[in-house]
Amino acid sequence: MFAAPDAVSTWLKSTAAEFEARIDELDGLDAAIGDGDHGTNMARGLATAATIAPAPGTTTRQYLNQVGMALVSSVGGASGPLYGTFFLRVGQLWQSPHTVSSIWQALKAGRDGIASRGRAKAGDKTMLDALCPAIQVLEHAAMERDEDAATTLTRAAAAAQAGAEATRGMRARRGRAAHFGERSVGHLDPGAVSMAMILDSASRHLI
Ligand code: ADP
Ligand code: MG
């Protein structure tokens, strides 16, 4: 187990590298139902966040607060404030060492932050459609007192991926994609794909 906030910063640094490698793919998804900048936005935001080196004594809460602020200030699109709020809220409830239950609580707070900031709910074809199924997996494991974080996070990441894929059949009701109306059906939501990436990276680094 890493000392806080090392595990979290390792998670986000690795996520930054994954966004860098998938800029074109995510820009392409956003080009179909938006303005084609989601990969560029996320890669820039995570790269800025990855430059934050937690000073000795920095708590994970303080670190995630800095990450959230970095995303808000460096990402021009709607996703900047939404992901910024997400990491800020996750940080407020983060516990070190983390458990299945504490990760569940933290992600729930992050979800509520996105939902209130974006006035979105599950089914609106947004990043929430990847996050909510992952939270359900964590909730179920926490209720069953299954505290195996590694396997639970792996299952949560798979649920997020399935949730992102399910956005293909949804009609967008929030953000730029909503302007496409029925024409948004048949396309993946780029923010749901990026949320699935973040959670997949969590499953490999928050262990
Ligand atoms: P912009 O739409 O400003 O260009 P991005 O392209 O970076 O910003 O991000 C688009 C993604 O942000 C969408 O795919 C969607 O998942 C998410 N999003 C947009 N608006 C909202 C909202 N109101 N609530 C939740 N998520 C949203
Ligand atoms: Mg965009």
Image (tube, rainbow, N blue to C red):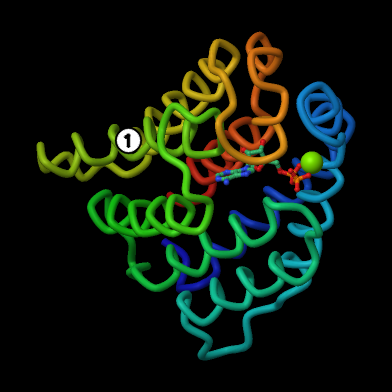
Residue under pointer 1: 152
Q: Residue 69 sits in which quadrant?
A: bottom right
Residue shown at 43% from the left, 56% from the top: 116
Question: Picture coordinates of residue 180 (x, y %)?
Answer: 72, 23
Q: Residue 192 sits in which quadrant?
A: top right
The N terminus lies in quadrant: bottom left
Amino acid tagged 1? Thr
Around disc 1, counting alpha carbons within 10 Å, would you say few (fewer than 14), some (14 to 19), or many (20 or more)? many
Left or right: 100 in relation to 171? left
- Residue toward you, 20 or 179: 179
Helix, strand or loop at label 1? It is helix
Q: Image height check: is 58 above or below 176?
A: below
- Residue toward you, 153 or 78: 78
Left or right: 101 in relation to 87? left
Q: Does the residue labelled 1 lie within 8 Å of ligand 1?
A: no
Residue shown at 59% from the left, 54% from the top: 11
Left or right: 108 in relation to 10? left
Which residue in the rendered view is the most extreme toward the bottom?
57
Residue shown at 55% from the left, 38% from the top: 127
Location of ligand 1 given as a quarter of the image: top right
Q: Residue 45 sits in which quadrant?
A: bottom right
